[in-house]
Amino acid sequence: MVFVLVAQALIAGPGKAVLSGIGIVLGLTLYHAALGFTGAYRNFFLHKDVSGINAQLAMLALASVLFAPVLAGGEVFGHGVSGAVAPVGVSMFLGAFIFGIGMQLGGGCGSGTLYTAAGGDLRMILTLVFFCIGGFWGSLDLAWWKELPEIDAVSLGRVWGYGPAVLFQLLILAVVYLVLRRLGSPSRSLWPPDGFTMQNLMRGPWPLLLGAGLLVFLNWATLLIAGHPWAITWGLTLWGAKSAVLLGWDPSSSSFWAGAFQQRALSGSVLFDTTSVMNIGIIIGAMLAAMLAGRLKPSVRIPPRALVASIIGGLILGYGARLAYGCNIGAFFSGVASTSLHGWVWIVAALAGNWVGVKLRPCFRLAV
């Protein structure tokens, strides 16, 4: 791990090395705390288990409070900062909806796919490959989708002021928590009553509250260092595009990839791309966590229907994320933390998609 950080610092500078380190700790946290969004929603729909969603509510509340002063200032450490704020429209809603279906068919979300694939799950490795392909495919069609009705990006913090916006969001989260208490019950406490030992630290599982708190802190640290919150799917889309270039695709044929930022990303190493660097870090961190837990055992067989589910799920995960301006991390977690209206609309559409995806899982003989 130290070698990776030193190499990153020598190649792309200390800032990228720090972000790589943040990615590694994110991977460790995601794996050991088992903070999956996909399983949390499935457990709620099927078993009324609100454990995972409660952890997300705590995570969003703390992130909203921490992000607000930084975003209100607009600058930190001599460089500008901006939140994850995006437009809301027909294509965005549809993208989040099909992303939700993809979560249940593919077996993971943006972060979940990375950390489970790193643990050696062949089905999730396949989902990750097609996630990249789907993201690239979505980028080629994005100009057409952008013609559909949408409203400009809305930051509640900028419209109302960050103080009132955060209070409003905390109220929403509190209401959701109270509603969920009536609809279901947690099977796993936010903090285990029997405590947390050194063995748990090395091998897992980590308490949900510890995992949620670390994800908030690491996302906040990303905002301070990178100037924007944690994101995942841009990196996967870029990996798909770079693979297409190797196969002979001409980037000038796409209006999306003709942009200056995209051209620089395509022509440069992924080690200079912030999202890619952090994604690679997540994979390394999750592999390290799996090794420490003694669970790094690559699977070699995938049932035929599960294989088809991974291909379809991966494709619509990538395609949907590109239309929806991100996934459960870049659009939902970072979006709500940034007081973006888009983040709240995203989760409504994605939950509807997850419900459909749960209903489709038996068709592919996936566990429910």
Image (spheres, rainbow, N blue to C red):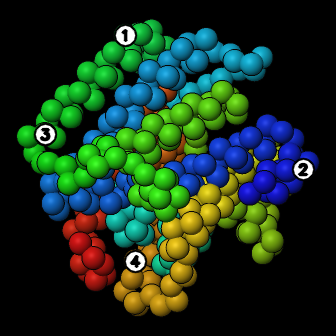
The residue to which callout 4 is attached is: 309
Local crowd size for mark 2, using a 10 Å CA cut-off: few (<14), some (14–19), many (≥20): some
Helix, strand or loop for disc 1: helix
359 relative position to 64: left or right: left
N-terminal of the pair, mark 4 or mark 1, is 1
In depth, the one of 43 and 239 nearer the eye is: 43
Q: CA distance from mark 3 to mark 4?
A: 33 Å
Q: Quadrant of the N terminus?
A: bottom right
Q: Residue furthest left?
A: 182
Q: Percent from the top left, x then y, of residue 5?
A: 79, 50
Please tell me whether residue 117 is drawn above or below residue 302 in the rendered image: above
Asked if labels 2 and 1 touch by Cβ distance under 8 angstroms, the answer is no
Helix, strand or loop for disc 4: helix
N-terminal of the pair, mark 3 or mark 4, is 3
The residue to which callout 3 is attached is: 181
Helix, strand or loop for disc 2: helix
The residue to which callout 1 is attached is: 164
The residue to which callout 2 is attached is: 11
